[in-house]
Amino acid sequence: MSLSLSLQRRRSWPSTGLAVAALFLIFVLLAVLFPSLISQYDPLSADPINAQLPPSAAHWLGTDQLGRDVLTRIIYGSRYSMLISIAAMAVAVTVGSLLGLLAGLARGALDEFISRAVDVISAFPDLLLALMLIAFTGPGTTNLIFALGVASIPRFARVVRAQTFVVMSSGYVEQARTFGLTRRTLVWRHVLPHAIAHVPVLATLGLGTAIIGTAGLSFLGMGPQPPTAEWGLMLAEGRNYLRNAWWIGVWPGVAITLTVVAVNTVGRHWQARFEGRQA
């Protein structure tokens, strides 16, 4: 009886965690799309008289060094942090999938060239490579998206390349060739859908890493510039006030942590379902 109850509890925990993570991400999505419906304050409007106020009924998470509402800035900051991360993943998915598909179809010298280029990119940690790229291109939102996207290309290129090899050597592709399908039709109808089947799962898991990378590089001043409300930038601004007004820097860090945990929870569950394991 106790063993059965224990198993039921273990099975209920993932479902409960998934539901909480999904609800949190829905709230983040609402904050990205409709921030003005959640908060009544202006994220850029300074009020020096009310600077560094602790959390209260008027300001649930307090105010920062310029008197701006911290909760409002976190809500509006989700737009920059999430959109930069999603855009970086879109760059990585598009370029990585195309390179992987091209390498898998071409093979030979072109495959070798693409594989070695991907290996070179993979030799550097994602954050370090992105930092190096921004050092050449300069800080800014567009350059941050480009740098994070390039750093994430290898994970998609390798998976799509490997899957392309598998699909091209499968029986149904060989049978499709015997029916006289052109190479273009064969690739678009049979190879591409199966080769990129893992990509959405990888993109979801990679989104959490992109959020951390966005916050980290913004913290170093490589992303959006003040007075923009962005989570990493808010962390950088709040680090000098941790003794006197801890809430300025702590709450953006909590927002980053919760969002990454929620994204990873959904991604791991999706991955388990995709692989046919118990989620």
Image (tube, helix red, strand yellow):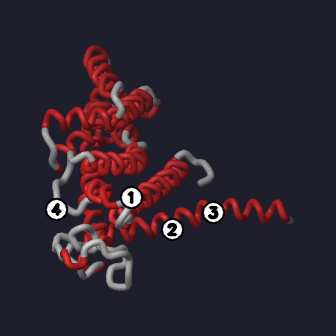
Observer-nearest of 269 and 178: 269
- Would you place residue 245 above or below residue 165 in this image? below
**Residue 30: x percent and y percent?**
32, 72
Residue at 35% in and 37% down: 156
Residue at 77% in and 62% down: 6
Observer-nearest of 188 and 223: 223
Residue 190, quarter of the rendered image:
top left
- Would you place residue 121 above or below residue 79 in this image? above
**Residue 275: x percent and y percent?**
54, 45
Q: CA distance from mark 1 to mark 3?
A: 25 Å
| Circle 2 residues within 10 Å: few <14, some 14–19, many ≥20 | some
Point out which mark residue 227 bears.
Answer: 4
> Helix, strand, or loop for circle 3?
helix
The single residue placed furthest to the front in the displayed view is 244
Q: CA distance from mark 3 to mark 2?
A: 11 Å
| Visible residue check, residue 88 | yes
Mark closest to the chain's N terminus, 1 or 4: 4
User: The C terminus appears in which quarter of the rendering?
Assistant: bottom right
**Labels 4 and 2 touching (C-beta < 8 A):** no
The single residue placed furthest to the top in the displayed view is 109
Point out which mark residue 31 bears.
Answer: none
| Circle 1 residues within 10 Å: few <14, some 14–19, many ≥20 | some
Mark closest to the chain's N terminus, 3 or 4: 3
Residue beneath label 3, please? 13
